[in-house]
Image: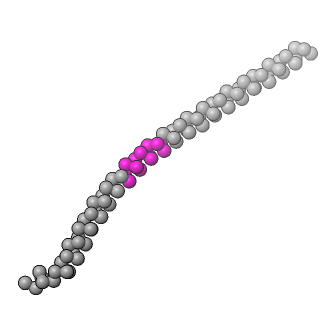
Amino acid sequence: MARAGGITNAVNVGIAVQADWENREFISHISLNVRRLFDFLVKFEATTKSKLASLNEKLDTLERRLELLEVQASTASANQSLFSA
């Protein structure tokens, strides 16, 4: 009888070891995918910040041009005599 119990115990240990390896493999895949997701998010953030900075520079340039045009338009409307010549 002791022998049968030993075999059962060995089978249970084998099953537990197999389950442990499967769990470790699953955790390893999850960890790898989390790292990949993190890397993607870091790159995405850097790219987005770069593009937003570029857009901000373009908007600043357009705002300065608009301010210049507004000054020129207000100067021209204040000096209507320049157009009647």
Quarter of the image with the N terminus in it: top right
Q: Which residue is at 53% across, 37% downward?
A: 35
Q: Is residue 65 above or below residue 48?
A: below
Q: Is residue 70 magenta?
A: no
Q: Is residue 7 above or below residue 66?
A: above
Q: Which residues are magenta?
A: 40-52
Residue placed furthest toward the left:
85
Say which quarter of the image contains residue 16.
top right
Scheme of image coloration: one colour
Left or right: 75 as drawn, with respect to 27: left
> Looking at the image, which is closer to me, 59 or 6?
59
Q: Which residue is at 38% across, 53% downward?
A: 52
Say which quarter of the image contains residue 46.
top left
> Looking at the image, which is closer to me, 54 or 65?
65
Residue placed furthest toward the bottom:
84
Count of numbered circles in the view: 0
Q: Is residue 41 magenta?
A: yes
Residue placed furthest toward the right:
1
Q: Which residue is at 27% across, 68% downward?
A: 67
Provide residue 83's location: percent of width, then percent of height. Answer: 12, 82
Provide residue 54's location: percent of width, then percent of height. Answer: 33, 53
Quarter of the image with the C terminus in it: bottom left
Provide residue 22's location: percent of width, then percent of height. Answer: 67, 30
> Looking at the image, which is closer to me, 33 or 14?
33
Left or right: 3 as drawn, with respect to 43: right
Left or right: 84 as drawn, with respect to 18: left
**What type of secondary structure mainly makes up the magenta span?**
helix
Q: Which residue is at 48% across, 39% downward?
A: 39
